[in-house]
Amino acid sequence: MKKSLLFILMFFTVLFAFGQKDKSSKVETKLLVFPMYNINEISPTTVTAEYVAGDLSFGNQKMKDKKSVCKPSGGTVKDAVEVSTYYYEVPYTKPLSYIVAKDASGNIVYAQQVSESTQEVVNFGYDKCEYWVADKMKKDWEKSSAGFKSNIAKKVDDELYNIAIELAKANVYPSFREEEIEVFTAKGKSYDYTALDNTQEIIIDVYKNIAKNGLSADAYSKLVEAIKVWEKELLEVNLEDKKARISKDVALGLYENILNASLYTYQLEKAINSGLEIKKIFGNYSNNKARYIDERIQFIGTVQIGSNKNEQIISDLNQLNAISQKIGAKSVAVKKLPVSDFPRLKSEYVEFSANVFSEKMDASNKMTEDKIASGEINAYDKYIIPGASSKTLMMSPFTMAPDLTELPKEICEITDLVSLTIMMNKIVSIPPEIANLKELTKLDLTKNMITALPAEIGELAKLEELSLKGNQITNLPAEIGNLKKLETLDLSDNPITEFPEEMKNCSSLKKILLKGTNLSAEQQAVLSKWFPDAKIKF
């Protein structure tokens, strides 16, 4: 009995040691999405669509056999026996297909690829007991193959055409996108989450109401107020402490709440920002939720185009709600074209997609520029490669980075950087502000033109690797002796001739790379004496 009680106590101790967790409830709702053109300027009733599919092609059939339970003609269930029956496995290539919609003037307002070219398989004679003799199946195939293939081709074409019609309805008119989303609160006995619990209940009811009645002024107002509650809670987030009231898990849920509520109130930049915050927390960790957020951000970018085109309508809640009440099964003329029109529609789809991508990039660039101008984000954040437990900034011609003549002070403001690599630039100097990068464990400035290092580099107490090969360094400052944790030093291909006496204080050095330097034999001997256990390559 004592052992059982001890086990239960240990179980709950471990359980609560994991700290505060998010808690969610799912709700079905629907989002009003606008087409990618201004419906006040172009009436959806004047828009027509064209659809085309490529050729469906069949491969060579392959005979297969399987075990079937069959009964003889005129027999009963009791007479059934297991026999081998034959069938043909018939491969085919499902075709590419496209839909393109245009206004009365012939301008493309929507285009989409309906299907991809995929390899599929269909079976002939699979469920027929009469094919226990292979020759009979072969004869029937010879007589029926043309009709069988024709039926399959028609079935596939009809399926794709019906998909095209539904796509036209959803993208030519304002339409509802049905969704199931999660609304998060938090759980944990250590803290009071009443405000989050109440907000969750209110917003679940709001989403249910939107599903029935569209986005009313009351629903809009409650979503906006909920965003304020979640943003206030996030002010005390502590991503490092699992036991914090707003821990990493709780924060992820709150950011997702803000993402969805901002989407449903058409505050799309805020929605995207929340998605990006979630991605930052996840780092390079990939799971179903991370992939969902990626897809969500992409979707919001598409919604943003239609919302920007119909900004005047969206800013008027009464008009917005009135449109949502009118949405129904709208009829869109979708003309099915012969395969000879396939190249034209494909070309129009590619043209439209390029324009959409350009609009998304313009919106993204503007958002980034605005954030940089306001000081909300660092100009060099876009070169950061997030990791599960570290932050790396990498710049080179391969990352489309601009040529730098000095290490930017703005980079030195990213104080949680663990690794900094700037390769093949034109940096000739490093500012004293580099001392701000206290967490740095790797500094790689390969193939620049650095002539001297600042004394403040000695303050990088956590630096483990320093790579400055291929530059024009002639000397090192005495402060390099402060790098007590430095393990690797790479000064290859620099015209350096000597080292300061203080360098021997770098007691953790294990590897020194000095190929292509101008060190004398005497200097080489001095280094070998200073670091007898280090691997030195001259």
Image: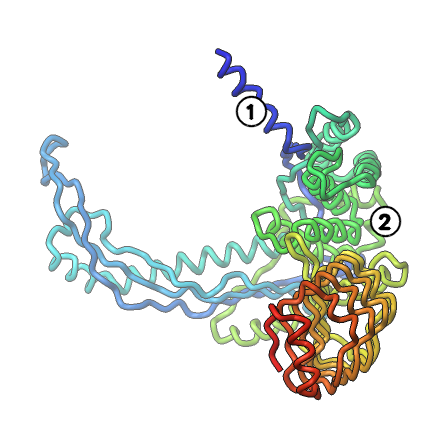
Q: Which residue is mark 2?
A: 315
Q: Distance between the Cα atoms at labels 2 and 1? A: 53 Å
Residue sitting at the far right = 374
Which amino acid does the dot numbered 1 rest on? Phe
In x, y percent, where is residue 246?
75, 36
Front residue of 526 and 211? 526
Which of disc 1 and disc 2 is earlier in sequence? 1
Q: On screen, 357 above or below 271? A: below
Query: SS of the residue at dot 2?
Result: loop
In x, y percent, where is residue 27?
64, 34
Query: SS of the residue at dot 1?
Result: helix
Which amino acid does the dot numbered 2 rest on? Ser
Task: Please rate how many residues cluster around mark 2, counting C-alpha atoms within 10 Å: few if below 14, some from 14 to 19, many from 20.
Answer: few
Q: Quadrant of residue 229?
A: top right
Q: Quadrant of residue 6?
A: top right
- Which quadrant of the rendered structure holds the C terminus? bottom right
- Residue 104 visible to an observer of this rendering: no
- Residue 458 visible to an observer of this rendering: yes
Looking at the image, do the residues carrying marks 2 and 1 touch, with CB atoms under 8 Å apart? no
